[in-house]
Image (tube, rainbow, N blue to C red):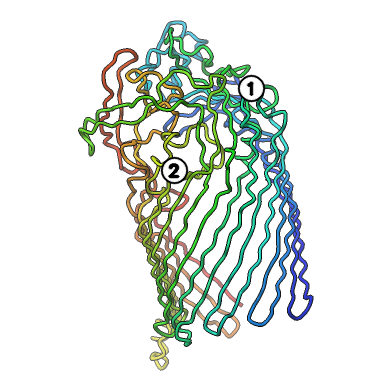
Amino acid sequence: VDVDSLTLRLSSTISSRLVNEGRFLWSHELASQVAQPPLPGEPTTADGFSPQVTLTNGLTFGKANFLDRRALPDERRFQFADTMTYATGKHSLKFGGDVNRVRDIDDNLFTGAGAYTYGNINDFIVDYVNFTSSGALRAANVTCATLASPAANTRLAGKCYTSNYQQGFGQPRFVFSTTDYSLFAQDDWRVTPRLTLNLGVRWEFEQLPDPYPALINPALPQTANHPSDKNNFGPRLGFAWDINGDGKTSIRGGYGIYYGRVIGSTITNALINTAVVGQSQILSSVNPATTTAPIPAGNSAAPIFPNILATAPTGSATVNYFASNFQLPMIQQGDLVIEREIARNTVVSASYLFSFGKYLPNFVDTNLSPPTSSARINVADGPYAGVVWSFPYFLGAARPNTAFAQIQEIRSNIDTKYNALVLQANRRMTNGLQFQASYTLSVARDDGQNSTTFTPSFSAPFNPFDQQGEWGYSAFDRRHKFVASAVYNTNFTSLKDNKTASAILNGWTIAPVINMFSGARFTAVTNSFSPSGVFGFSQAGGLNGSNGSLRFSYLPNNFFHMPPTKYVDLRVSRRFTIKENAKLEVLGEAFNIFNRTQVTAINNRIYNVACPVSGAGGTCTATFDPTFNTASDLSNGFFFRERQIQLGVRFEF
């Protein structure tokens, strides 16, 4: 990553009441990365590299699907902002604007070397041995090992990968620009000595690039959609009221509407993933299985591992486009705080906070017919024994538009709701003691919010025709959170006549930090299986035929949570005065002092589902996975660690 930037600022005092500040920024960022040479034994079928191989246990090797990245981005930014402040009587007025233009050069063909995904290592070994034996296993009609889908167990070696094969085709280099505009005005009004109001409004507009005429697909007119959301006005209201006029009890509140941006990777995908042969980038997705005979040979359009395709097969291209009514993300935030001074430099407060999101991005596959039947699975044991799990099933071997695979609409239809009560106690340093403590009781819900920074290769909702079915607790929901910290300096004045005791006990600083909060939420899922042998072949594969999530949809999203997180840090130091202008400090710091193990990941597979082989009829059965809700990662090394202690000496002169 190479970054250069230049920032200029000019502050001007125009009069005793009028001040202006102008700012200018120019910056250039180039991020690039190329794949490392293949290791001995790796296939080199992808122009001298190995295709990416992913095992569902998290192991990935080969040429990463995001490489080579010759420029992603090569970005040049020009930004100018100006703010003017005018003071008159009880009012302090501010108004200004901002123009931010960004030009991006992207030179990257996603999944240009191909990508294979395996449900288990045994199936990968079968395909790899078939490769190293020059296809001998396939020639001998050796079948796959333990594919999760019984309907595909009869497939021959070479096509044992469980998920669709993916490969990118087309032009790697594109150039586009975005320009952000904003204007604001604000009035800080001191109505009375005890009441202050803050009144403001802000307008924002993100001008997206026009679609490339050559990349508009005449077979899909929606690829010409060009969002232009110009109605983004955000009012800002705030107040502070000194109730009794003695500065000890106050009520403060605020409310505002804020808007987010459409990020560059989403814009890029909508611009270039339009399936125009020879012009756009085409991400092909090919199912290794087939719905017609001969099943053992698999889909003839799918490659034999580790080969890649020379051209995109018909009907395999993925398309992205913006919904015609796409809106920028909007957040409404507000708070109401009551604060009281209970002692000198010590205040307590109670706050209500809320944050409501609307128009957050979502990615939905529209190349699906509405579900015409229901899948029914008998739950044999576990916490939901006896339940008949039923969910909509997208029946049909072909997609409605057979010329394409996934036609993904970028929508703005995700809602979020966060409410919280916060209790706080704060004391500034007084008589050697300072502390801060807060407790938060909160709840967060949404209907499928995700933090994806690109258009994914799957349908985000479980049922693309029922977004409300995604409503549940948010992955960010942490019901309880308690944080406390203190700093205590020992200075016992009663020991001033006892030099020995004073030297031992005075001059110490003790500073603990306590953190306790509820465990993160997680969603119960099932194994990767295909019920097509019982319910019929589906349009897009996966659990319900929509290529969606593996969620155990009998329960809502994020129904469970991990164990709570608790840890204590401590700093102890002692200062020694050598002479007036020279001091020595000896300190020790301990992190996670009680060496508590934190659960940072969980086994979230609640049931394993098995279905009869294709054509055999019968019933699918779900059996409880005994590893469910057990730890899969302890004390993630980046965030939480085992107890660590460090010692230091600092000399000040």
Residue 362 pos. (x, y %): 51, 41
Residue depicted at 64% across the width and 78% down the height: 91
Image quadrant for the N terminus?
Answer: top right
In the image, taking residue 365 as reference, residue 525 lies left or right, namely: left
Closer to the N terminus: mark 1 or mark 2? Answer: 1
Task: For residue 36, say whether it is visible.
Answer: no
Task: For residue 324, say whether it is visible.
Answer: yes
Residue 370 pos. (x, y %): 43, 28
Q: Which of 612 and 47 is in front in this view?
A: 612
Residue 46 in which image quadrant: top right
Q: Dot 1 corresponds to which residue?
A: 48
Question: Which disc number belongs to residue 310?
Answer: none
34 lies above or below 422: above
Residue depicted at 23% across the width and 39% down the height: 383
Q: Which of marks 1 and 2 is in front?
A: 2
568 lies above or below 448: below
Give the amino acid type for the residue marked by disc 2 in the picture.
Answer: Gly
Secondary structure of residue under mark 1: loop
- Determine whether label 1 and label 2 are within 8 Å by CB: no
Q: How crowded is mark 1: few (under 14 residues within 10 Å), some or many (20 or more)?
A: few
Secondary structure of residue under mark 2: loop
342 lies above or below 52: below
Residue 607 pos. (x, y %): 30, 33
Residue 494 pos. (x, y %): 38, 91
Q: Dot 2 corresponds to which residue?
A: 448
Image quadrant for the C terminus?
Answer: bottom right
Residue 522 in which image quadrant: top left
Disc 1 versus disc 2: distance between alpha carbons?
40 Å
Give the amino acid type for the residue marked by disc 1 in the picture.
Answer: Gly
